[in-house]
Image (tube, rainbow, N blue to C red):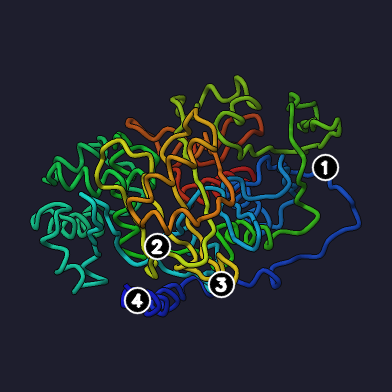
Amino acid sequence: MRAYATKAKACANVCRASDARGSNRPTVAARRRRTTTLAHKDKADVVVIGGGLAGLAACNELEKRGADYVLLESSDDVGGRVRTDIVDGFLLDRGFAIFLTGYPEAQKVLNYDALELKPFYAGADVRFNGAFHRVADPFRHPLDGLQSLTNPVGSVADKVLVGLVRFQTLLAMGTLDEMMSADGETTIMKRLKDSGFSDEMIDRFFRPFMAGIFFNRELTTSSRLFNFVMRMLATGQNCLPAKGIGAVSAQLRGYLTADRVRVNAKVTTLSERDADMSRTLTLDNGETVTANKSVIIACEGPEAARLLGGSLEQSPSKPESAVGTMCLYFSMDKAPTDDAILYLDGDNKGGIVNNCCFPSNVAPSYAPSGKALASVSIIGVPSEDDAKMEAKVRDELSSWFGDDQVATWRLLRTYRIPYAQPNQEPPTNFARSSVLGNGLFIAGDHRSSSTFDGALVSGRIAAEAATK
């Protein structure tokens, strides 16, 4: 197992070299602008509601254009679902998330070097019939790929087919925009079956792997997103920022003028436009903020619908129910493995753990010295209380890593995230208009694909439209 950890370190050099494309992005300090003496900015030409990735991306574009704007975020900090908490010296992402370096929009707006991206091993260990079986990316780990050909996680033909599908998404599907809007959309499940994958490969590998990304073990998510993920895996690496996934949001905030960002500023109502084309936004503390020209709503789908009411009817987001997840973090003295890899439940026999990993194996900064961190993900948000879920997780992982090992783990925190992603089942439209008319614009992952890149693109497009 230590051999794989060594390979992961070697991969880190590749990760840094391949991500030099983002290194021309100015540092956070270099992008800070002068601030004013205003304690709270309460008037701007463009008001952005929501400080998640989409809202931050919108403000980043507004900043570059020299626009007068203010960002209103309802919680105590920006980031939305892309935040990291520090608990007893551990970095806990608010829901397990992986950063894909192949994201094209992220390459344009983020400084990858400053994020200190640490790569996962390109593959996964799949739990099946009481043992782990490695599925490796044959292009990055050719020896491991050959050794995995005969394991029970699918047939030899299945593993060869993975490479063929990878090349298909990379070379034969046009640009990213063309791929995400192409005809023939179906579900991931049907896409896999039509491609010729066996039921064993689908159930033992693709079901837990794709469910860990899209929180849908039935694989009824759009096939367009399967194609997107396969292309991203072919063009980049899976990484964690050294300071947690929240470092992505923090870097975007650092590009903004300090007094343009207001937290603990929840918007309760939007007024109609006045004669001078302005709008009044009322906060839950009774204060008001004036939008002289435009408002960009960059909230989660349900909150955007609440604020906009009938204004969203001409270009609605997908109305079906969102998908959720539950994530548990455990502290331990030493991880049961040194590998920087994902562990997947390939048994598909009703277990609650879909995937887990040890983030501190990927980025040691996730845990204090002499400690290790485990992240465990469950698909959906169960009705049972945290104590019952913890007991079930411990019982299940004891068969994975041993009773003596898991019994010593200490629960750090449990996150329940009912709105992890909007519904992305077909039919989908990943290029919904950001323009609602009458000075209203909308951004968010419910307008594009629910990926980091989709949120970043959505925010930029809304800002471009709002400043025309």
Q: Residue at x 37, y 80 (%)?
A: 10
Question: Is the residue 149 above or below the residue 293 in the image?
Answer: below
**Marks 3 and 1 close (CB-CB < 8 Å):** no
Q: Residue furthest front?
A: 404
Label 4 near label 2: C-beta < 8 Å? no
Between 247 and 133, the one nearer to me in the picture: 133
Residue that mark 1 sits on: 43
- Give me the disc on residue 370: 3
Q: CA distance from mark 3 to mark 4?
A: 17 Å
Q: Which mark is residue 127?
A: none
Q: Say which of marks 3 and 4 sits in front.
A: 3
CA separation in Å, label 1 and label 2: 41 Å
Mark 1 and mark 4: span between their CA atoms?
A: 57 Å
Percent position (x, y) of residue 380?
44, 35
Residue at 63% x, 25% y is: 306
On screen, residue 188 above or below 227: above
Q: What whole-number distance in Å separates the C-alpha atoms at marks 2 and 4?
A: 20 Å
The secondary element bearing badge 1 is classed as: strand
Mark 3: few/some/many CA within 10 Å (<14, 14-19, 20+): few
Q: Kindly identify which numbered label has been placed on residue 238.
A: 2
Which corner quadrant holds the N terminus? bottom left
Describe residue 458's horizontal placement relative to residue 441 as left or right: left
Reply above or below: 222 against 109: above
Residue where numbered disc 4 is placed = 2
Mark 3 and mark 2 in contact (Cβ < 8 Å)? no
